[in-house]
Image (spheres, helix red, strand yellow):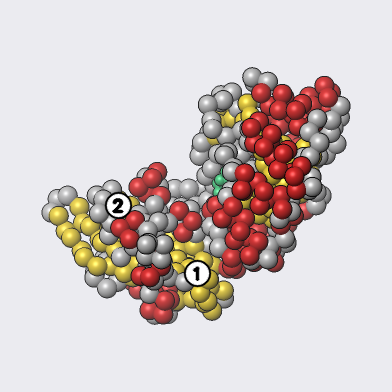
Amino acid sequence: MFVSENLDVNSAGHLTIGGADTVELAKEYGTPLYVMDEQLIRDNLRRFHDSMNKYYDGKGEVHFAGKAFSCMEMCRIVADEGDGLDAVSIGELYTAFKAGFPMEKVGFHGNNKTDEELRFAVEHGVGHIIVDNISELQRLEKIAGDSGVRPNIMFRIKPGIDAHTHDFVKTGQIDSKFGFALETGEAFEAVKEAVSCENVNLYGLHCHIGSQIFDIAPFEEAARVMLGFISEIREKLGYEIEGLNLGGGFGIRYTEKDDPSPFETYLEKVSDVVKSECSRLGIKLPKMFIEPGRSIVASAGITLYTVGARKEIPNIRTYISIDGGMADSPRYILYGSEYDAIVANKADQDKTEKVTIAGRCCESGDLIGENMKLQHAESGDIIAVCATGAYNYSMSSNYNRLQKPAVVFVNNGASRIAVKRESLDDIIRNDI
Ligand SMILES: *Cc1c(COP(=O)(O)O)cnc(C)c1O
C-alpha cells in the first residue's frame, strides 16, 4: 500500500511511521518537519554489514555516505552499529568528530579538498583519505610530513563505467571531475608517484559509478575493472593494494514504479565476483569497503507539511500549496525526482485526485511533484512526502530566508528531536 515498509495507518486513519502517528508529530513539533525512523536506519545498516560478513567473510566495512543525511545523532547511530562513515567536507568531518565518531573508521572524499581540510583529516586520525588528483597528493604529502602522521590513502579511479538507473554503458568515460582516468595511464602514473611518497601510505583504490542504480551488473563490472588494475600494479610495480572501495549508489524505492535489487543480492554477487577474480588473477583478497548513502536513509525518512491554499484551475491542474518546498526538498527542482505523497490525516482514504504539490518559494519551478495521486486535500491537512530521508535535509537551504525545519527521530512509537528548527535569530546570526 505504501512505498516504504515502515509506513502504516492507525485506527484514527492517520499515517504512522515507525509506529508514531504523523498527525501527532506535526502537532507536537510543527511543520515542515523531517521525520527519520531510527529502526529502519539501523535495519538497513545491519542488512549491509550482515551480508558483508556473510558473503565476504567479514573482510569488509560499510561506510555510510554522510552527504545523504548528516547530523550528530545520525553519526552516533552509525557508530553504535559499528559501521564507518564517508565524509566529503570539513563540516561533515567536524560533525562526526563532535559526535564522538571513531575517526579511524572515516573515509574522507572530495575532488577539491582544501589544505585546511586535509590538515584536519590528518590531525584527527581519519582512517583513509580518498585522493582525487595529483596536486592533492602532493599537498597531502607535505601536510602529512609537517604533522608527523602517515595517513592511509586511496585513489579515486574512473573505471569507465557509466551506470544509469536501469542500465549501464562502458564508456571509458573520462569526462568527469572526479578521480584519475585508467585508459590514459593517468591512474598508473599517480600510483607510481604515491608508492614513492614518504609521508603517505597508498592503501587502496576507490570507485563510485553513480547513484540510484537498480542493477547489479555495473557494480560487478566495476569490481572486475578495479581488480584488473590492482593486478597490473602488482605485476608492474610489485606493490600490493590492500583495500578496494566500491562506493555507493544502490537504488531505493521512491514510487511504486521503482524495483531495486535487494542489498543482500548485491553483496552476494559482488563478493562472488571479487573472490573469483582474485583467484583468477592470483592476487590477495582486498579488504572491501562500500559506501551506501541513499539506501540507508531515504526510505527511513518522510517530510510533513501543512496544506495552505488549494487552487483549482479548471481543465489545467489543481495546486496544493504547502508550507515548505524547494528550500527543504530540492530534488524535484534539481532533477525532476518523483515522490509519493499521502494526506497523513486521511491515510485510510482512497487517492481520488491528481494534483500538483507546490512549495512556498518565489519560483514557479518550486514543486514537490506534478500529477501526484493524492487523497482530497484541503487547507489544514497534513501531507507526508515519502522516502525523503536522503538528500533533502542535507541539501536544504535558507532560500527566501526560510528557517530550516527540525529533524525528529522516531523509534517504536516514541519520538525525540535530533536537530532543532531554526529560529529567526538563526537566520540573521551571521549578519552584521
Ligand atoms: C554520493 C556518494 C556515495 C553515496 O551514494 P548513494 O547514491 O547515496 O549511495 C558514496 N560514495 C561517494 C564517493 C559518493 O560521491
For residue 11, side relative to residue 73 (left or right): left
Q: Position of residue 406 (x, y in %)?
A: 44, 69
Disc 2 crowd rating (10 Å Cα; few below 14, some 14-19, many 20+) is many
Instruction: Tell me: 350 left or right of 395.
Output: left
Near mark 1 (Cα within 10 A), the count class, few <14, some 14-19 or many ≥20, is some
Which of these two is toward me, 1 or 265?
265
* Residue 66, position as x, y percentages in the image: 58, 54
Tag of residue 366? 2
The residue at the far left in this view is: 314
Compared to residue 300, the image places residue 259 above or below, namely: above
Determine the image quadrant of residue 352: bottom left
Q: Mark 1 falls on what kind of element?
A: strand
Of residues 231 and 57, the one nearer the viewer is: 231
Q: Amino acid at mark 1?
A: Val
Asked whether disc 2 touches disc 1, contact meaning CB atoms under 8 Å apart, the reply is no
Q: Measuring 61% from the left and 48% from the top, which residue is drawn there?
A: 116
Which residue shows up at 56% across the image and 25% down it? 174
Q: Quadrant of residue 202?
A: top right
The kind of residue tagged 2 is: Asp
Marks 2 and 1, how far apart in space? 24 Å
Query: From the image, which quarter does the N terminus lie in?
Result: bottom left
- Secondary structure at numbered mark 2: loop
Identify the residue shown where x is 38% and y is 74%. Answer: 30
> Label for residue 419?
1
Tell me which residue sits at (59%, 30%) in the image: 161
Image height check: is 161 above or below 353? above
